[in-house]
Amino acid sequence: MKYFWIFLVTIILTSCGVSVAVDYDKQVDFTKYTSYNYFPTIDSGLNELDDKRIIQITDSLMHQRGFVKSETPQLYINFYAHENISNSRNTIGIGVGGSGRNVGVGISGGIPIGGKVVNQKLTMDFIDVVKDNLVWQAVAEGEMKERSKPEEKKAYYLSVIQKILKKYPPSNK
């Protein structure tokens, strides 16, 4: 039953608006990269639990794509996030209006529902270890509830990282 809820939350979050932008070095042959590890000094700006979630999910997805985590990697993966908290954009509208004899008056307003949300910009960098330079970068923007449960956070990061890694390696068309 636990996995059903994680799956359901993943489906809901996947349908929500996480947008991903990618930039990369067009001179790089991405087919030569087969191994990775994490940048030695990651300062993500997130708490330790979220860092572990991101690393676990990334490891799983990279493994599924045929990459090997190695102590002598070809790529370093670095990630960091910027967050801010805002009111939910979901509102209930209330309006009052009237008209008579060619005169119209209207008043309306929105009452926020759903509490506060965390707007997050998660950046993931792939760095060529030998050349020590950035070769690929993805920036994902999304939002989650401020008081998300651990399962909800895991589902959120799973959907975000799936969308990020869907764009790696870039197609050279």
Image (tube, rainbow, N blue to C red):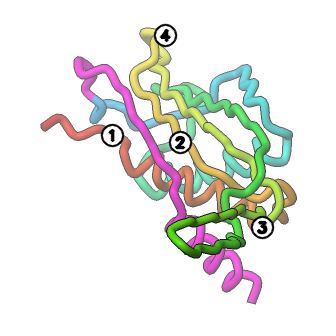
Q: Which of marks 2 and 3 is in front?
A: 3
- Disc 3 crowd rating (10 Å Cα; few below 14, some 14-19, many 20+) is few
Distance of label 2 from label 1 (alpha carbons):
16 Å
Among the 4 quarters of the image, the one containing residue 167: top left
Nearer the N terminus, badge 2 or badge 1?
2
Q: Distance between the residues labelled 4 and 2?
A: 23 Å
Which quarter shows the N terminus?
bottom right
Task: Label 2: state its secondary structure.
Answer: strand
Disc with the residue nearer the chain's start (1 vs 3):
3
Marks 1 & 4, CB-CB < 8 Å contact: no
Task: Name the front one of labels 1 and 3.
Answer: 3
Q: 97 or 153, which is in the foreground?
A: 97
Looking at the image, which residue sits at the far left?
Answer: 173
User: What residue sits right under mark 2 in the picture?
Assistant: 140
Indicate the amino acid at tag 1: Pro
Residue 169: mark in rendering: 1
Instruction: Please report contact status of discs 3 and 4: CB closer than 8 Å, yes or no.
Output: no
Question: Dot 3 corresponds to which residue?
Answer: 113
